[in-house]
Amino acid sequence: MEKKVSAVLVAAGSSTRMGFDKLSFDLGGETVLHRSIRAFEQCPLVTEIVLVAGKNRAFVEQQAADCTKPVQIVAGGATRAESARNGVQAATGELVAVHDAARPFVSQAVISAVLEAAAQCGAAAPAVPVKDTIKQAKRGDGKTVPESCFVETTPDRSTLYAVQTPQCFDRTAYLAALEELDEEKARLVTDDCSLFELTG
């Protein structure tokens, strides 16, 4: 692949759902964040790494200190979408691979396959078929089932996929899609792929 690639690792979250800092969790002598950085450091297609930090900037700097590839650290935003945007804007590659830094076990095969696919068609993401039966019902808060919640429909499981990271894009197209997004649509962005979906 001839295109320059920037890996954007989003490490600005507060881990509120887990109740502890996932990024500093010890995986047997190596933190989750360090393992994530190493995955992209070892990928020959990646030319630079952009780390998006929050209040944990000193920790992020420490974890990136021994990285052999060019690294830059940028400030995150109020939401995950804003943090990803800040990282993509700081990146210099023609392709960007946006990855949740709390997912340390991404394989070289997955990184390479998604980057190759994005180089061909402008955007790509890894996904796995959903194994659970999914029920659609009234909107909740994402943490608990709402009161008087009744099933409205059961989507065909064979059409459903759980999307993972890295999600890879042509950087110019990503920034153009951001420009097209109005405030109402911006609230619907739950991952980077949905940015492309919402802007057509």
Image: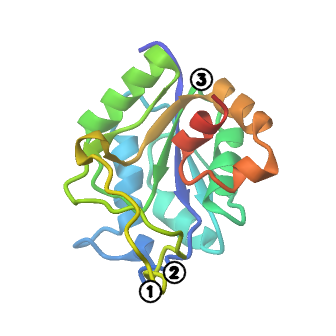
Residue 84 visible, this angle: yes
Question: What is the distance, in whole Å, between disc 1 and disc 2 at their CAs?
Answer: 5 Å
Residue positioned 49% across, 57% down in the render:
64
Q: Nearer the viewer, residue 65 or 121?
A: 121
From the viewer's perspective, is the residue at label 2 or at label 3 nearer?
2
Residue corresponding to mark 3: 94
Q: Secondary structure at mark 2?
A: loop
Mark 3: amino acid: Glu
The answer to whether 198 appears left or right of 103 in the picture is: right
Res. 195 image quadrant: top right
Give x and y (percent) for residue 124. Answer: 44, 30
77 or 75, which is in the foreground? 77
Q: Do tag 1 and tag 2 residues touch (Cβ < 8 Å)?
A: yes
Image point 51% across, 17% down: which residue? 3
- Packing grade of label 3 (10 A; few <14, some 14-19, many >=20) is some
- Circle 2 crowding by C-alpha within 10 Å: few under 14, some 14–19, many from 20: few
Q: In the shown orientation, is residue 199 left or right of residue 157?
A: right
Q: Is residue 117 above or below residue 57?
A: above
Say which residue label 2 marks.
Answer: 16
Which structural element holds mark 1?
loop
What residue does disc 1 label? Answer: 19
Answer above or below: position of 20 versus 34: below
Residue shown at the point (61%, 59%) measured from the top left: 80
Q: Position of residue 48 (x, y in %)?
A: 53, 37
Quarter of the figure that contains the C terminus: top right
Q: Position of residue 147 (x, y in %)?
A: 48, 87
User: How far is mark 2 from mark 3, CA to CA?
Assistant: 33 Å
Amino acid on which disc 1 is placed: Gly
Give the quadrant of the N terminus: top left
Q: Amino acid at mark 2?
A: Thr
Residue 46 occupies quadrant: top left
